[in-house]
Image: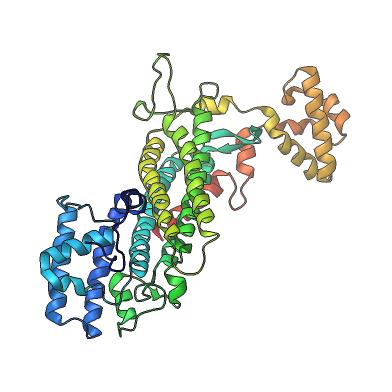
Amino acid sequence: MALWGGRFAEPTDEDLRTLNDSIGFDRRLYREDIAGSQAWARALVGAGILSQDEADQIVSGLQQVLKEFDQATFELQPGDEDIHTAVERRLTELVGPVGGKLHTGRSRNDQVATDFRLWCMGACETIGARLRDLQEALVQRATDHQVTLMPGYTHLQPAQPVVLAHWLLSFFWMLQRDRDRLVVARNNAAVLPLGSGALAGTPLAVDRHAMAQELGFTSISQNSLDSVSDRDFVAETLFALALAGVHLSRLGEDVILYSNPLFGFFALDDRYSTGSSLMPQKRNADPLELARGKSGRLIGNLSGLLATMKGLPTAYNKDLQEDKEALFDSIDALNALLPVLTAVIHTLGINPDRMRAALDEEMLATDLADYLVAQGLPFREAHHAVGAAVRAAADAGLPLSQLPLPTLQGCHALFAADAREAFDFDKSVRSRDSAGGTAPAAVAKQLEAARSALEG
């Protein structure tokens, strides 16, 4: 039962049908397609196209179609080129010719845009909830490690000591921004295109605002030409997902490094590690490597859609069929990845002794410069003096804290015996107590803010 074809004398070539049909992937829109069709049937009553009895038959028939899809008993037929065709074909089988009235005043152009927006809205909420689960895991682990010291790195070089909770919460805030972006993407998708027809609107007196309210949209589209081809909401969602993937990749990279025996800070639970088919000793951080790999895939899906959209003429074009698989793939990837990463964080073995042993006194060089600043020396001069002291210690083969006082004073006269008090990792961390800093007191406030963000 094709939805078109009266003006054609020849049937569609089978190779073209294979290329053209989208039922293989857009069938997952069945709930949204049926909900939109039920809303349209009710709107047609108000427009005088359907009687209430006819609308009731259609709505009831669509409910039966929904049940068949939900129970996996729906049987696709060779002519079902897309989800819209499949649903309408089965509806007509169930309710008879009245089913043919459903599409009055409607186009697959505004129909698919409606379906996909609804699906996108739900997908944003689902991924947002999964990101929140991971955030909760990070907060839980951070709560237990507010005074656990570890090296902080920049350029992957030892920099300054931090507490483990601070490292964990750095990813919390990345994910919070991701959740915020998904809320924006979801809200931008919540614009009803139904009633736009193919491109010019509909002559029927349908109440678009009532349909929007029924379906959960917050507004209606203002231009029919734009609304049937607008896929900004898909691009915005793909961007939010891609950036979330980047953040998950960064988390994965850190855990991969820190679980390497050369660091030994972390140990992955056996349930979330894999082994080697050749080397019996191996423990591979495959979930984190997959986080890195899937990030590239998410970025590719965004780039592909933008490339598809950039040259399209006004209104709907078949190119837009390419929007769905990209978003479906990105959502599927994160739905598979996020529960595993959440479990990795929950079960991650942490070795505080190895982290503390990895602290190097050179990481307190800034504290030594701060000592000179407290004596009234401009920071730039203090920085230079401490740099000279670091070089002198390296030349002498000594830890910085063991550099003789005369040698220190040779770097700057303001060094005194109490300069050695700067070589205290715990004191260094406690001193970084500005808002957002790594001091345990500041981290405790950060945890409060994180918990508030989860409740919001």
Q: Quadrant of residue 439?
A: top right
Residue 310 in the image: x percent, y percent? 55, 59
Residue 18 in the image: x percent, y percent? 33, 49
Residue 32 in the image: x percent, y percent? 28, 62
For residue 10, side relative to residue 181 (left or right)? left
Residue lying at 63% horizontally and 38% vertically, measured from the top left: 427
Residue lying at 69% horizontally and 34% vertically, measured from the top left: 364
Residue 339, visible in the rendered structure: yes
Query: Which quadrant is home to the N terminus?
Result: bottom left
Residue lying at 44% horizontally and 63% vertically, measured from the top left: 317
Q: Nearer the viewer, residue 9 or 96?
A: 9
Residue 444, visible in the rendered structure: no
Residue lying at 44% horizontally and 24% vertically, measured from the top left: 284
Q: Nearer the viewer, residue 421 or 368?
A: 368
Relative to 274, residue 343 above or below: below
Q: Quadrant of residue 384?
A: top right
Query: Which quadrant is home to the C terminus?
Result: bottom left
For residue 17, side relative to residue 300 (left or right)? left
Q: Quadrant of residue 96?
A: bottom left
Q: Nearer the viewer, residue 298 or 264?
A: 298
Picture mark count:
0
